[in-house]
Amino acid sequence: MKTPLHRYAPSTTGFEPPPNALDLRKIIGLKHCPPLETGEDVARAFAEMTALKHEVVVSGAVDRRSRLVGWNVVAASTHDPHALRVGDVFTPVMKTSGASIVLVRNSTTAHLRTSAREFEFIRNVSEAAQLLGYTLLDYIVLSRKVWCSLLETPMVEAHAPLLNLHRVELAKSGSGEWQCRMCRKSNRHVQPTRPVIYGQYTTTHCAHCRTFAWLY
């Protein structure tokens, strides 16, 4: 089966989806919406993005059965910090009543580079998702030959201070403690019942200073 974007073959002038791209169910039908259970599934579903001549960021809406049910272009330029608006990420998931989101960015070079600004964007999206009741499942960067997840452990740990990332050693009871980087106070953490980011991260706020934090 062709990927969900095959009807909108990207041109050299841009990547503008039609209005109904927000709801993929209306285009190919719910039973044909591809499952996004792994990073490889995401890279395959959005493979058409690698033909673009410039970088864009796309947000995909995922339902409770891990199916891609909608998508939208978040930013037509990853080099303009004002173009990366957090609110645009949630348009397709709200339109389709989805449960989670995935972010995808194409790379115009073979080197899948990233930046601190991109991880700051991930942090802001994660915080907004927590407040709105959604989960950021993955952030995939892909080129014609390779792809990678920015939420793999080495990359996330490399930006631990920016993400306010903490390791939690859970006891048999399913609870543990972590110390906020900002106020240095201890917090109690209980194993979450809803899906976590990329299967290993969860998001929360410090109970004392309300600083947003990632836990793993």
Image (cartoon, rainbow, N blue to C red):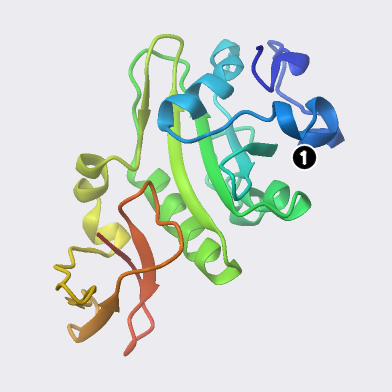
| Residue 98 appears left or right of 55 | right
- For residue 154, above or below residue 31: below
Q: Is residue 84 left or right of residue 163?
A: right
* Residue at figure coordinates x 71%, y 20% from the top left: 14
Give the residue displayed 50% in from the left and 67% down from the top.
Answer: 130
For mark 1, does the 10 Å Cα neighbourhood hold few (<14), some (14 to 19), or many (20 or more) residues? many
Q: Position of residue 81 (x, y in %)?
A: 52, 46
The reply, left or right, for residue 7 in relation to residue 108 is: right
Residue 7 versus residue 88: which sits nearer the camera? 7
> Does residue 101 appear in the picture of this structure?
yes
Of residues 30 and 90, the one nearer the viewer is: 30
Asked whether, in this view, residue 171 is left or right of residue 97, the answer is left
Considering the numbered disc 1 on the image, is that residue within a helix, a strand or a loop?
A: helix
Q: Which residue is mark 1?
A: 22
Q: Quadrant of residue 152?
A: top left
* Residue 131 to residue 79: above or below: below
> In the rendering, at what x and y percent does residue 84 appear?
57, 46
Residue 16 point in image, percent of width and height: 76, 27
Pick the front one: 128 or 44 = 44
Number of numbered discs overlaid on the protein picture = 1
The quarter in which the N terminus is drawn is: top right
Quadrant holding the C terminus: bottom left
Q: Look at label 1 and name its amino acid.
A: Leu
Q: Residue at x 53, y 42 (%)?
A: 102
Task: Decide: is 129 above or below 154.
Answer: below
Q: Is residue 74 visible?
A: no
Residue visible at 42% across and 67% down in the picture = 193
Examine the image and state in which quarter residue 109 appears.
Answer: top left
